[in-house]
Amino acid sequence: MGVFSVKLTGGQIVAKALKANGVDYVAGVPGDGSWALVEALLRTGSDIPFIHVIQEQSAVHLADGYFRACGRPMAVLLPAPLGISKALGGIAVALADSSAMLVISGGDSDRGDDWPEFTATGITKEHVRVSSIEQLPQTLRQAFDTMFSGRIGPVCLDISTAVQNARVDASLPPATLRANGASEIPPLMVPRPLAQLSSVLEGDALLMVGTQSLQETVGEMFPDYQHRGHFCTANVGTVGWAVPAAIGAKLAMPARQVVCAISDGDFLQSMQEMAVCVMHSLPVVFLVFNNSGPESLSDVQVSLVGQHRTGEFNLPDGKPYSPDFAGIARNFGLDAWRVEHASQLNPAFIKALNSKGPSLVEIITARGSRVN
């Protein structure tokens, strides 16, 4: 795509940045503080559909559901400053459940420094008040980078009516508006694969679950499964238990499906026992949630220091590290698949469950996604 050099309004810069970062929809309630941006969204070259909802919080919930379903963010447009918005509760839910969205509020730039600050609520990853049109390109890039760095969550920009309507001579190739990770598909959250798994398992399947952090999520997704074949180590969450326990369950019930759902840190404690499945032709399905680190340690440390450190597997430069579990499984003699986005889940599960021998599905999941 070429470079454009024209006079752009602040609203048009926002619209082009949304387009450059893969935002397909904007939901919200238009008003006096956002008409310039709504108009910019519908201009040729942007063409981003605006979903007009009835009340503000619905726009946030809509964007939340969209992200959970496809892993891509929407933008939410609210006419009033966020400090008094009716959408605060919905944004808090999105943060707690690691849903990505860009929340943009309009309003009057002359309200003064004593206006209720959204940052005081602590329910977004970042809140930035944009005071000039010159800030917009950099601020928008940073917003999308922040949204997907570390634990995923909503980011809020307060863009006044004056900034939306201001004009500036702009030479903005799309690359200058695109965040560093905008072309990457965000990793899955743990509940999505479990929901997909429940739709393809047979009614009498045995689900063996690893450590406690994963047990809690499985308990939420399979509320009545305890009585139908969901096994774990009570509240102890013994690492290294699930893999051999699943093998024992398959020996006991060879005619029933047996799935071992386990986190990557737990799997590393006993993955060598996959060899037993190969030697005895036991078609156990290993479902490995790979988020580059033991979740329970990360959860504790985040609550204490506000960031991940020793609870994750990292390289010296801080980038996440994990073994290639699917590749390791193939070397053991298993059929194996690596899943990185939602469209791969169902085909991988069906192939694994229909495999004549042991199989493994490695699912790349977001860090900090256990509680979602």
Image (spheres, helix red, strand yellow):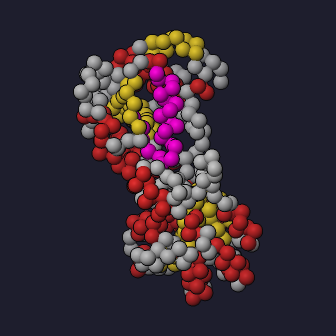
Q: Residue at x 52, y 59 (%)?
A: 311
Magenta highlight on residue 70: no
x and y percent of residue 79 in the render?
Answer: 31, 28
Q: Residue at x 43, y 60 (%)?
A: 300
Q: Is residue 29 left or right of residue 177?
A: left
Residue 126, by quadrant, is: top left
x and y percent of residue 328 in the render?
Answer: 71, 66
For the view shown, which residue lies furthest in the bottom direction? 252
Residue 282, by quadrant, is: bottom right
Residue 244 seen in the current view: yes
In this rendering, the count of numbered labels is 0
Residue 83, by quadrant, is: top left
Q: Is residue 199 above or below residue 320?
A: below
Q: Is residue 81 above or below residue 98?
A: above
x and y percent of residue 360 in the render?
Answer: 64, 68
Residue 287 seen in the current view: no
